[in-house]
Amino acid sequence: MGKDCGKHGDDDFRQGCRRFITVLVVLAILVGIIALIVYLVLRPTHPRFYLQDATLRQLDLSNSSSTAGGVLSTTIQVTVASRNPNDRVGVYYDRLDVYASYKYQQITVAASLPPVYQGHGDVDVWSPVLAGPSVPFAPYLADAISQDCQAGYLILQVKIDGRVRWKVGSWISGHYHLFVTCPAFLVTSGGNGSPGASGFRFQTTTYCHVEV
């Protein structure tokens, strides 16, 4: 009789374990289905950025030589627009730092934009002035920018480095890193033989590459 009771107890334990495992599997499947449904419904998309204008106010390269390089002083005002394409997801821009670069070298000090919340389909526009007084320039970069100016065109990059959060209903996510690169195409009717801001005009609105 004692052996039968022991065997019956083992069977109950095994059945209990099977029920527990079955419940865990069902819960995992339900969580996966809910996550898939939320993703398909929301379809979160990163914000879209556009460079609408770029006005070059100063571009002075001094002490330029083939061995010592030079010192670049730049002032450029840019107009950047951002649109939230999501229908159900809001965006908190907690930090946005904007600066200009030439061939991957930063040529202006980063300008901080005010924090803002961007609702569904909203558009925000900023027009910061980016200044870079006395930035040391490598010899090959000094030669490159001089040649570009003589050829009558200049390609700069307007970059945005920031932190964003997503908002869905009352839920707000943690911080995500935002990095935006906008090409700025500046052209002139003819070169003047040396770098300078006069004569350069922004050519066309450009779509920015966004990484989140």
Image (cartoon, helix red, strand yellow):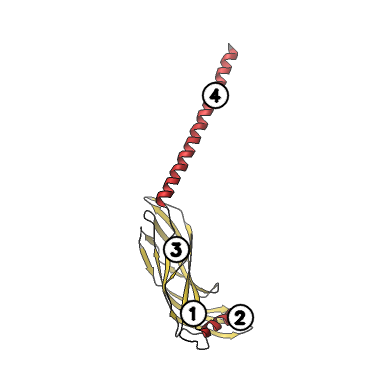
Q: Position of residue 145 (x, y in %)?
A: 54, 81
Q: Which quadrant would residue 129 be assigned to in this image?
A: bottom left
The residue pinned by badge 1 equals 74
The residue pinned by badge 2 equals 139
Contact between marks 3 and 4 (CB within 8 A): the answer is no
Precedes in sequence: disc 1 or disc 2? 1
Separation (CA) of disc 1 from disc 2: 17 Å
Q: Position of residue 178 (x, y in %)?
A: 48, 61
Going 47% across and 37% down the picture, which residue do you hit? Answer: 27
Q: Position of residue 64 (x, y in %)?
A: 58, 85
Precedes in sequence: disc 2 or disc 4? 4
Precedes in sequence: disc 3 or disc 4? 4
The residue pinned by badge 4 equals 13
- Left or right: 194 as drawn, with respect to 43: right
Separation (CA) of disc 3 from disc 2: 34 Å
Separation (CA) of disc 1 from disc 3: 24 Å
Circle number at residue 95: 3
- Left or right: 90 as drawn, with respect to 28: left
Report how many numbered discs are placed on residues in the image.
Answer: 4
